[in-house]
Amino acid sequence: MLDLDGEVGRARGEGFSCPDLKDFTERRGYIRDADRPGEVTLRDVLLREWEIVQIVKEGVGDCHPLVANPLSANPALDDEQREALDALLCSTNIVSLFRGGAGTGKSFVLRELVEQVQQAGRSGVVSKLLAGTNAVMDQESKLPGAKELASLFPK
């Protein structure tokens, strides 16, 4: 018979020791690294991450730019934003990373990116590129900026 009161108590941290936790995680097949004792992962997660790394490595310089002849950037963009937009539009890599601190205009640059790609007649590319973004944002809506980013790309 299942002791629900005991299970709920353990979920709250009651009557649950560090050795109990270690024993539980060892049975789950978590992978540990002695140099990073506070972190665990699973074999499936590592394999998926490795697949992503391989896709990125194989896709360096493997694509046509998103836009062959980018338009003049929106004059409201500052120099760094304009540089980021140009790098994204002209990238020949299968994956491009785009990051910046809060309030640096990432969303503004992404809007400009989408607009230029659409004006170049590549709306299908935008749909394909951003379909995954919405799925990730739906699942990871607790990430900083996730809701804002997802709102840029209506489903």
Image: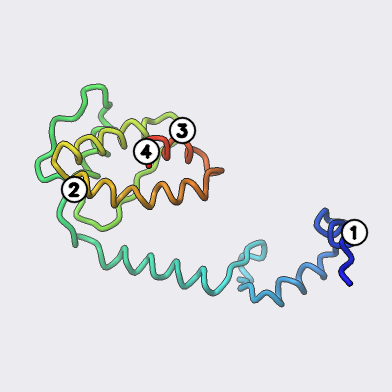
The residue type indicated by label 4 comes to Pro
Q: Earlier in the sequence, mark 3 or mark 2?
A: 2
Q: Secondary structure at mark 1?
A: helix
Alpha-carbon span between mark 2 and mark 1: 57 Å
Of residues 44 and 91, which is closer to you in this image?
A: 44
- Residue 90 image point, x, y percent: 18, 46
When the figure is inspected, residue 101 is found, relative to residue 75, above or below; the finding is below
Inspect the image, locate mark 2, and give the three-letter code of the amino acid beneath it: Leu
Give the structural element (helix, strand or loop) at label 4. loop
Q: Which residue is mark 2?
A: 66
Query: What residue is at 19 percent from the left and 36 percent from the top?
Result: 116
Secondary structure of the residue carrying tag 2 is: loop
* Residue position for label 1: 5
Which mark is first along the chain, 4 or 2? 2
Left or right position of 87 against 71:
right
Q: Position of residue 9 (x, y in %)?
A: 87, 57
Gap between marks 1 and 4 measured at Cα = 44 Å
Which residue in the structure is indicated by mark 4? 154
- Residue furthest left as drawn: 69
**Label 3, on which residue?**
102
The N terminus: image quadrant: bottom right
Q: In the figure, residue 26 lies in which quadrant?
A: bottom right
Of badges 4 and 3, the one in the foreground is 4
| Whole-number angstrom distance, CA of label 3 to CA of label 2 | 26 Å
Task: Give the quadrant of residue 151.
Answer: top left
Report the Cα–Cα distance between label 4 and label 3: 22 Å
- For the residues bearing labels 3 and 2, Cβ distance under 8 angstroms: no
